[in-house]
Amino acid sequence: MKMKTAFAIGLALLAWFALILQWLILLQVRRAAGLSLSGGVGNFFSYFTVLTNLLVALTLSLPLVWPASRAGRLLSAADFRTGVAANIALVGLTYSLLLRALWQPQGAQWLADTLLHDVVPLLYLLLWAWVVPRAALRGAAPCAGRCIRWRTWCTRCCAAHGWAAIRIRSSMSRNWATRAWP
């Protein structure tokens, strides 16, 4: 097995682990607060961090499992991977520069938080720099279009549920998992 493939598999497993850990923490906190678990689904998938880490996990997993499939070919394209890299970089930078000081997670939440905001973004960017051929990126207009569509889709989903203002308030009050889903 090539070293690049082994790195991609390891990173995919790490991203899936971080997402599953965050999901389990959210369910545990909601259960303890007496809130609905079904509301936790909407809560979980309303975070750009979760959606983008899920995209990283899928981008690394599907081309390995089903390389000849339409999804496998799309997710392994250089311009698509570049769009994923731009979005996961946005996750890491935004969290580090704007959100990290708002709370200090402990225990398993610290681990999930660190993996989702620091480790997976950094490792994906390293993998992207290592794997994606620069020649394939010349004139990569589709990449810019995909980045914009992904951010627009995430923004519309959040706006449709009124999460823009709620997200800021809930981050400041540190009770992200216990909010009732509207």
Image (spheres, rainbow, N blue to C red):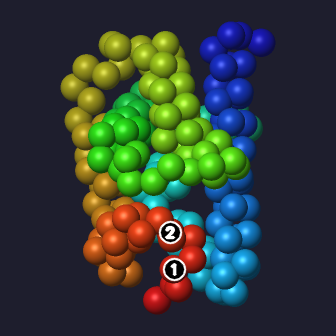
Local SS, label 2: loop
User: Is disc 1 placed on a helix, strand or loop?
Assistant: loop
**Residue 109, percent from left and from top:** 63, 52
Residue at image position (38%, 54%) is: 102
Q: Which residue corresponds to the image point at 73% horizontal and 79% vertical from the top-left? A: 31
Within-10-Å neighbours for mark 1: few <14, some 14–19, many 20+:
some
The part of the image, by quadrant, that contains residue 152 is bottom left
- Return the mark for residue 4: none
The location of residue 146, given as percent across then percent down, is: 33, 47
Query: Residue at horizontal 42%, vertical 69%?
Result: 173
Q: Crowding at label 2, few (<14), some or many (≥20) Cα neighbours within 10 Å?
A: some
Position above or below: 42 against 63: below
| Quarter the N terminus occupies | top right
Q: Count the numbered circles shown.
A: 2
Amino acid type, label 2: Trp
Farthest residue, direction right: 1
| Along the viewing direction, whichever of 52 and 148 lies nearer the viewer | 52
The CA distance from mark 1 to mark 2 is 6 Å
Residue labelled with disc 1: 179
Which residue is at the front of the view, 134 or 127?
A: 127
Query: According to the image, label 2 marks what residue?
Result: 176
Residue 60 lies left or right of residue 78; in this view the side is right
Which residue is more in the foreground, 126 or 153? Answer: 126
Question: In the rendered view, would you say 93 is above or below 3?
Answer: below
- Tell me residue 16's x, y (percent): 68, 45
> Hey, what amino acid is under mark 1?
Arg
Q: Are marks 1 and 2 in contact (CB under 8 Å)?
A: yes
Residue 75 visible, this angle = no
**Whether residue 114 is visible:** yes
